[in-house]
Amino acid sequence: MRIVAGLFLAFIILSSFHQIDNLMGTWQYAGDITNGKKSAAPTEYSLQRNYTSSTYEGYVIEKGYEPQKYETGNYKLSGDSCLEIQTWCMQPSNLLNVAIHYHSHVVNDTLVLTGVLPNGTAVEEYWKKIK
């Protein structure tokens, strides 16, 4: 009986972590860890990304206002890697047209992107799928 319970528990744990072929849909920023410091998602607005099979558009969504596009980009998933290139940003950006390599995985409905930015900042971002 213990073996069956152990196998069932292992299956549940392993099935909650999975690789995906694309990020299609809408994902909402849910916080991050930057250089070891945990930050919650903002409460006065939300950040969302709408993904197609190879591109994304980022929006700032604030109650009472129209969503405002703040960035666009391309991405490519390969195994547990995500290569992301920001192609447009509404503000000056040091990441424009720079390829960022992330380790990526999905835990239940949350995308986790872990990597190091070109300036040396270690990041772990959390994006929750909403559509």
Image (spheres, rainbow, N blue to C red):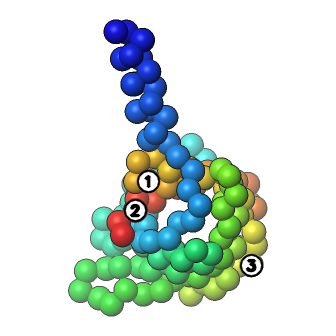
- CA gap between label 2 and label 1 equals 6 Å
Task: Please identify the quadrant where the C terminus is shown.
Answer: bottom left
- The CA distance from mark 1 to mark 3 is 26 Å
| Disc number for residue 129 | 2
Instruction: Tell me if mark 2 has few (under 14), some (14-19) or many (20+) residues whose alpha carbon lies within 10 angstroms of its own.
Output: many
Disc 2 is placed on an element classified as strand
**Image x and y of residue 59, in percent:** 44, 80
Crowdedness near tag 3: few (<14), some (14–19) or many (≥20) residues, C-alpha within 10 Å: some
Percent position of residue 124, x then y: 56, 51
| Residue 66 in the image: above or below residue 50 | below
Compared to residue 21, the image places residue 87 above or below, namely below
Looking at marks 1 and 3 on the same chain, the residue that comes earlier in the sequence is marked by 3
Give amino acid for label 3.
Asn
Closer to the camera, 130 or 36?
A: 130
Residue drawn at 70 percent across, 79 percent down: 96
Mark pair 2, 3: CA separation: 25 Å
Of 57 and 47, the residue lying toward us: 57
- Kindly identify which residue carries mark 1: 110
Task: Check contact, mark 2 vs mark 3: CB within 8 A.
Answer: no
Mark 3, secondary structure of its residue: loop
Task: Indicate whether 69 appears above or below 5.
Answer: below
Closer to viewer: mark 2 or mark 3: 2
Say if residue 93 shows up in the picture.
no
Q: Relative to residue 1, is residue 95 drawn left or right? A: right
Which residue has dot 3 on it?
97
Q: Type of residue at label 1?
A: Thr
